[in-house]
Image (cartoon, helix red, strand yellow):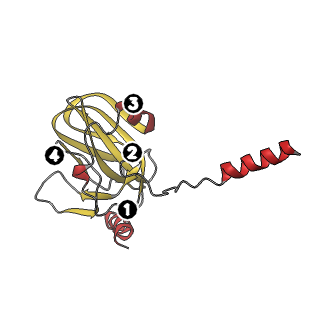
Amino acid sequence: MKKKLFILISILAISCNNDKTDTQTDKTSINLITGINLRETSDDSELQLQFGNPNILTNNKFLIYPNPVNESVNILAQENVTDVWLVSANPEKIYQDVNFNNILNTNLYSEQSIISHSIFSSNKQSSKNFSINISSLAKGYYKVFIKIGGIIYWDNLYKYENGGDNEEQFNTIKNFWTK
């Protein structure tokens, strides 16, 4: 009887954990997207729209376009890019008042962590301007990690499926971030 009582008390003690569990995603989660910049071309004079509060770190080292994208995304960098990884991500309308410039830095994610989370990689690049075909990837949000001069930067990307026009894709993104 004492043994059963001890087991029962042990089970209750374990199940009655008083730690408060925060179900909100961590600000620096590799799979979190808190906003996105949309652009059709690399031309700075073109209209660029921002929705949410993008948790990106580009340091003006590169651009990805078009965003949203269907088949091929273009990468335009100031220096040669050596590696590109795409990590599937989840958009969440949280941390909209956070200044990510004070949180994000080039040492935040290890290359090994990015590789282990990536669903697409393009290694051994040596170019400032190139395209990668992502047509085989599923519709959704991705973090695009780019290695330039041994340093990793990232931006957020939305991939849409064939059959939708640009206006329809734009409205899908806009409706998510503004409602």
How far apart in space, not on screen, are marks 3 and 1 (Cα)?
A: 27 Å
> Which residue occupies 24% across, 56% down?
99
Q: Quadrant of the C terminus?
A: bottom left
Q: Which residue is mark 2?
A: 30
Q: Nearer the viewer, mark 1 or mark 4?
A: 1
Residue at the far left in the pictured view: 45
How far apart in space, not on screen, are marks 2 and 3 (Cα)?
A: 12 Å
Give the percent coordinates (x, y) of residue 100. 26, 53
Callout 1 environment at 10 Å: few (<14), some (14 to 19), or many (20+)?
some
How far apart in space, not on screen, are marks 3 and 4 (Cα)?
A: 24 Å
Give the percent coordinates (x, y) of residue 39. 23, 57
Q: Which residue is mark 1?
A: 94
Q: Is residue 34 above or below residue 6?
A: below
How far apart in space, not on screen, are marks 1 and 4 (Cα)?
A: 24 Å
Q: Secondary structure at mark 4?
A: loop
Q: Is residue 175 above or below residue 95?
A: below
Q: Which residue is mark 4?
A: 60
Q: Nearer the viewer, residue 112 or 159?
A: 112
Which is more N-terminal, label 1 or label 2?
2
Report if the CB atoms under discs 3 and 4 are less than 8 Å apart: no
Q: Secondary structure at mark 1?
A: loop
Callout 4 environment at 10 Å: few (<14), some (14 to 19), or many (20+)?
few
Q: Secondary structure at mark 3?
A: helix
> Which residue occupies 44% across, 46% down?
137
How far apart in space, not on screen, are marks 2 and 4 (Cα)?
A: 20 Å
Callout 2 environment at 10 Å: few (<14), some (14 to 19), or many (20+)?
some
Three-letter amino acid code at the position of disc 2: Ile
Which is more N-terminal, label 3 or label 2?
2
Three-letter amino acid code at the position of disc 4: Asn
Q: Which mark is residue 112?
A: 3
